[in-house]
Image (spheres, helix red, strand yellow):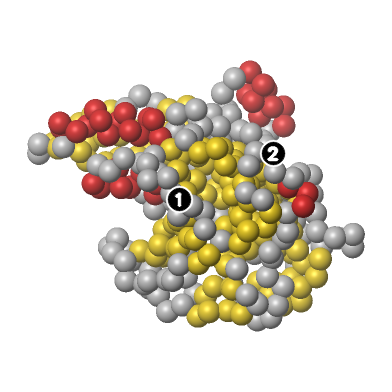
Amino acid sequence: MKLWRSKSKKKEFVRTNGQDTIVFKLALKPTGVFPRLFQLISGAKFGQGKTTSMSCALARPYKQLFESGKPIGRINYVFFKVNKWPSHVLGSLCFTLGHRLLFYPGLMERKVNWLYSKNTFQNIKSTGFVDHLTSEKDFASWHMTVLELDGTKKTHLQSSKTKTVSKNTVFWFGLSIRDPNVLETTPEELTLVFHSPPKDSDRRIKSLLKARENAIFHLTTLNKISLNKGEFLHFDFFIGPSDLDHKKLPCYVPISEPIVSGYAQAFKEGTHFRSHPVSLEGIEEKTWVVVSKHVGRLSDKAIFTIL
């Protein structure tokens, strides 16, 4: 489901100790007659509250611009909603100037305990947190970046190969979560505050605005299917063409203990899933986000799947 574009409020400058403090507000509210009418009639509240957290998935893609002035690339946001509003942040997608595809997960707890790969699990001893996942420009391999609280990299996870599932289509990674509350609640307003050398402030603001130019945010759902007690959610991320036959895509949900206990399909006739192609400026391929629900209990709040 395509979502309305966000509305950016006017930027603000404050000069202190030779540095500019730039305040940029991003309003995640419906614009236009139909979205506003839908919200009024249904009582749906897409987001809730306000945030200034630079650790949230909506803000993390901008950190390199704020900290070093390095250009961002293009950004799009992916949200998720099931059972009731407000929605949750599934994550941010970024296509860099180096032609790499990044995903910043919207997990509330991003500490890496272990990864699921090829029907086995790998223990990860780390005090850091997952910042983002990077697909290399040929889409043949990817890696996960784990950062400590001070922003340094102490945990080094080996690069993983993507899996070719059909012509021009690869499986990137999978993410399973116990319930939507594992994800950040979508805020109604995000305020970004950062410092900049005065001579570079205009360029950084232009880069920030360009990063989201023409982006149409996406709301992923299970359509009208609800999530019940004893069930969990799974998201598969594929990279492929816009005319991809999503009905033929496989589901790489983990089903074995100790990762999942009591696994079973949620539907007798097979796995029902909903596919959402997400676009980014500068890249022809779509990031296909495929969501499904399953019966069972995950051993952790969130599990990444690697093939």
- Please tell me which residue is depicted at 47% across the width and 70% down the height of the picture: 112
- Vertical comparison of 94 with 116: above or below: above
**Where on the picture, by quarter, is residue 12?**
top left
Type of amino acid under label 2: Asp
Residue 132, x across and y down, in percent? 44, 56
The front one of 300 and 67 is 67
Drawn side of residue 195 relative to residue 208, left or right: left
Residue 44, x across and y down, in percent? 66, 35
Label 2 sits on a secondary structure element that is loop
For mark 1, what is the residue? 137
Q: Residue furthest front?
A: 167
- Vertical comparison of 181 with 14: above or below: below
Residue 124, x across and y down, in percent? 46, 77
- Please tell me which residue is depicted at 51% across the width and 54% down the height of the picture: 139
Type of amino acid under label 1: Lys
- Please tell me which residue is depicted at 37% across the width and 41% down the height of the picture: 97
Residue 58, x across and y down, in percent? 45, 45
How busy is the neighbourhood of tag 1: few (under 14 within 10 Å), some, or many (20 plus)? Answer: some
Drawn side of residue 7 relative to residue 274, left or right: left
- Vertical comparison of 123 with 158: above or below: below
The front one of 100 and 224 is 100
Q: Say the numbered circle drawn on residue 173.
A: none
Instruction: Confirm whether residue 213 shows in the render.
Output: yes
Drawn side of residue 15 relative to residue 50, left or right: left
Label 1 sits on a secondary structure element that is loop
Asked if the residues shown at circle 2 and circle 1 are in contact, with their CB atoms under 8 angstroms apart, the answer is no
**Where on the picture, by quarter, is residue 162?**
bottom right
For mark 2, what is the residue? 243
The front one of 107 and 253 is 253
Instruction: Confirm whether residue 79 shows in the render.
Output: no
Q: In which quarter of the image is the C terminus?
A: bottom right
**Where on the picture, by quarter, is residue 154?**
bottom left
